[in-house]
Structure formats: C-alpha cells, structure tokens
Image (spheres, coloured by chain):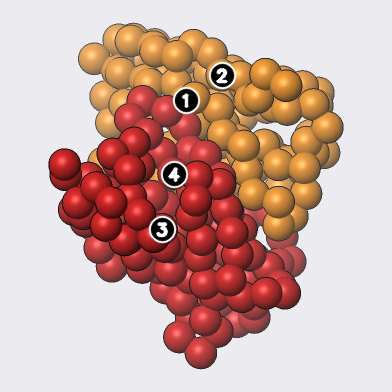
Chain colours: A red, B orange
Amino acid sequence: AQSVTQPDIHITVSEGASLELRCNYSYGATPYLFWYVQSPGQGLQLLLKYFSGDTLVQGIKGFEAEFKRSQSSFNLRKPSVHWSDAAEYFCAVGATGGFKTIFGAGTRLFVKA
Amino acid sequence: DAGVIQSPRHEVTEMGQEVTLRCKPISGHNSLFWYRQTMMRGLELLIYFNNNVPIDDSGMPEDRFSAKMPNASFSTLKIQPSEPRDSAVYFCASSPDKGYGYTFGSGTRLTVV
C-alpha cells in the first residue's frame, strides 16, 4: 500500500523568499505523485502531477516539483513566494494500478511581509 | 465547466438525524471520490466509484454511512443516524482517469450538535 509523509506541519517564509516543501512517499513502484493547495474554506486544487518522464515538473502558480527516486521524495518549490501563496499544501500518492490516492497530513504555509 | 458541485455548503443538524450530502461530478469524469477532512485525522478517503460502481468502501467508518451513485452525474453520501463525531468537512472529487489528479468540490461543512 502506498503512504506519504510531509515532515513539516507548518512553515513560515518571508514574501519574496524561496520555498521548499518536503514530501516523502512509500510505494513499491513509481507512483503517481501530486501536489494540491487548499485555501481556507475551499476545496483542494491540483498544482502539479508526475508519473513519468522529466523528473522536474512545472505546475500552476509558478510552482515546480522534483521527483527523486533514490530519496523517495517529491519536494515542491517556488523561487519567490507571494502573500497569496499562504495556504495548506498537500502531497499525494496514487497507485498506478488503481484510482486510489492517499494524501499527506499537509503543510501549512505562512507568509510574512 | 462549473466544476464539481456539492450541496449544501453548510449543514447543521441534531444528533440522531439523517444527513444527505450531494455531489455532481464534472461531466465526462468516470471516477468519483468522497473524502472527509478533520483536524485530527486529516483527509480520509471514505469511498470511491468508477463508472458509477463502488470500488472501495473500506474507508466508510460505520454502517451509519452509505453512498450511492445512481448515474454518472450524481452521488450522495448519507449518514443515518448522525453523531457529533461525524462533524467534519466532506469533500467530493472527480477524475477522468488514473493519474490525472482530482478536481475537488468546495466541500460540505457538517456540524452535528
């Protein structure tokens, strides 16, 4: 069965600073990997996804993520954070043989001026 | 596209009452998922359907919970009888196929008093 760990419960960064959110997964093969963002009172929105090909994937809102098989990681990055990026971010892993996706516990991002 | 539509947005009910949550997935998406989100347990997959057929309901917490998908454009999640510990945000999501990621609805915030 797949599982996903987000080690950081919350992170605070200054506006304009770079951001990296960590995600580690467990799965026997290469899984589907996703990052979602959730603003308060809203549903989750898909930022980007990876299954195969280039290990650096670009997403919406200027985010990117890098798949590192050797580290079982799929970290999310953004070069310059904006105040509107303050939200909760979820890493998720999906089994390639089915439709089920498991979500991490989330990392809450705070942006200070 | 209007996205995934959930109703109601908020529901307050008394313990013991029946609660029905509704979801309209995106047209053409053949998979539908019900998740529950709480502070303590995060995002939990309750049940998912593929082509209107329930595939995995192992996340349904008790027999008090039931879900149906009578056609490709409508699904319900019913709790009968409701209990205070059922208070949570319930999300519906749909997907066109494996690996595409989900589109989430805005959720239903359920409060059982």
Q: Which residue is mark 3?
A: A78
Q: Which of the chains bears the disc numbered 2?
A: B
Q: Are marks 2 and 3 on the same chain?
A: no
Q: Is residue A29 above or below residue B113?
A: below
* Residue A86, visible in the rendered structure: yes
Q: Amino acid at mark 1?
A: Gly
Q: Which residue is mark 2?
A: B6
Label 4 crowd bin: few (<14), some (14–19), many (20+), radius 10 Å = many
Q: Nearer the viewer, residue B10 or A45?
A: A45
Question: What whole-number distance in Å separates the C-alpha atoms at marks 3 and 1?
Answer: 27 Å
Residue extending furthest toward the bottom? A70
Mark 1 secondary-structure assignment: loop
Q: Which of the chains bears the disc numbered 3?
A: A
Q: In the image, is A54 to the left or to the right of A14? A: right
Q: Which residue is mark 4?
A: A37
Disc number for residue A105 = none
Badges 2 and 4: C-beta atoms under 8 Å apart?
Answer: no
Mark 2 secondary-structure assignment: strand
Which residue is found at the position 64% from the left and 49% from the top?
B101
Q: Which of the chains bears the disc numbered 1?
A: B
Label 3 crowd bin: few (<14), some (14–19), many (20+), radius 10 Å = some
Q: Are marks 1 and 4 on the same chain?
A: no
Q: Amino acid at mark 2?
A: Gln
